[in-house]
C-alpha cells in the first residue's frame, strides 16, 4: 500500500495515465476518493476482485512500452484480464467505474450486480466509486493498519 501511495503522490509519473486514469488529473486521485492514505486493504478487511468465467484462459503479461488503451474502452480493445465485462477495466479511475453508473447497462450491469449481490449476501459492502472494491462488515480490526512485507514466496506458504 505504501508503494501505491508514493506512486500517487509522484505527480511526475504519468506513465499509466492513458490506461488507468485518462480523464482524471493525478493530483485528484486522493481528493476524489480513488486512493486513500490508509485503506481497509491494510486492515485485512477489504478486497478488490472481479468475476472470471471458469475454466479461465491464461492472460499474457504486459510488455513495457506497449500502447495503452483507456480502461473504459470496449472490452475487446482493453488489456485482456479474463474477467467478465464490467463496462470498465479493473482499477479504472473514472466515473464509469462507479458501481451503479447509469451509463452501464445490459450484460455489463448484470455482471456488476452479480458481483455486488453475491458479496453483499456474504456481508461485504461495496465502495460506490469502484465496482471491484468490497469491505467485510463488521471489520475485525477497524482501527488497525497492518504493515509488513508480503513476498511471492510467502503467498505460497514458503518462508
Image (cartoon, helix red, strand yellow):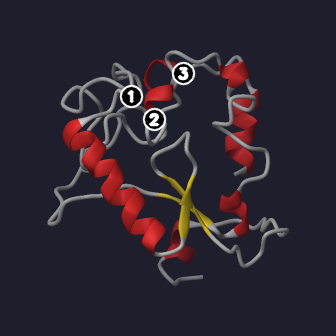
Residue name at image x 64 percent, y 16 percent: 25
Q: Nearer the viewer, mark 2 or mark 1?
A: 2
Residue name at image x 51 percent, y 84 percent: 157
Q: Which mark is residue 155?
A: none
Question: Disc 3, disc 2: CB below 8 Å?
Answer: no
Residue name at image x 65 percent, y 60 percent: 41
What's the distance in space between the residues labelled 2 and 1, CA to CA? Answer: 9 Å
Give the residue pinned by disc 3.
15
Is 10 on the left or on the right of 114, as rendered? Answer: right
Closest to the observer: 155 or 142?
142
Q: Which mark is residue 71?
A: 1
Query: Badge 2: few (under 14), some or many (20 or more) residues near its Cα, within 10 Å?
Result: many
Give the residue pinned by disc 2.
97
Q: Position of residue 6 (x, y in %)?
A: 75, 37
Question: Disc 2, disc 1: CB below 8 Å?
Answer: yes
Is 111 on the left or on the right of 154, as rendered? Answer: left
Vertical comparison of 82 with 45: above or below: above
Amino acid at each position: 500500500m505504501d508503494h501505491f501511495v508514493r506512486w500517487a503522490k509522484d505527480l511526475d509519473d504519468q506513465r499509466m495515465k492513458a490506461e488507468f486514469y485518462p480523464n482524471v488529473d493525478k493530483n485528484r486521485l486522493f481528493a476524489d476518493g480513488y486512493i486513500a492514505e490508509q485503506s481497509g486493504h491494510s486492515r485485512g478487511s477489504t478486497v478488490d476482485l472481479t468475476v472470471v468465467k471458469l475454466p479461465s484462459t491464461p492472460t499474457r503479461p504486459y510488455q513495457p512500452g506497449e500502447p495503452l488503451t483507456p480502461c473504459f474502452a470496449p472490452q475487446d480493445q482493453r488489456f485482456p484480464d479474463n474477467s467478465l465485462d464490467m463496462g470498465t477495466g479493473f482499477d479504472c479511475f473514472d466515473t464509469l467505474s462507479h458501481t451503479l453508473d447509469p451509463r452501464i447497462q445490459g450484460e455489463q450491469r448484470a455482471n456488476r450486480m452479480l458481483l455486488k449481490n453475491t458479496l453483499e449476501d456474504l456481508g461485504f459492502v461495496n465502495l460506490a466509486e469502484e465496482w471491484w472494491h468490497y469491505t467485510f462488515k463488521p471489520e475485525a480490526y477497524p482501527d488497525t493498519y497492518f504493515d509488513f512485507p508480503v513476498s511471492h514466496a510467502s503467498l505460497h506458504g514458503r518462508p
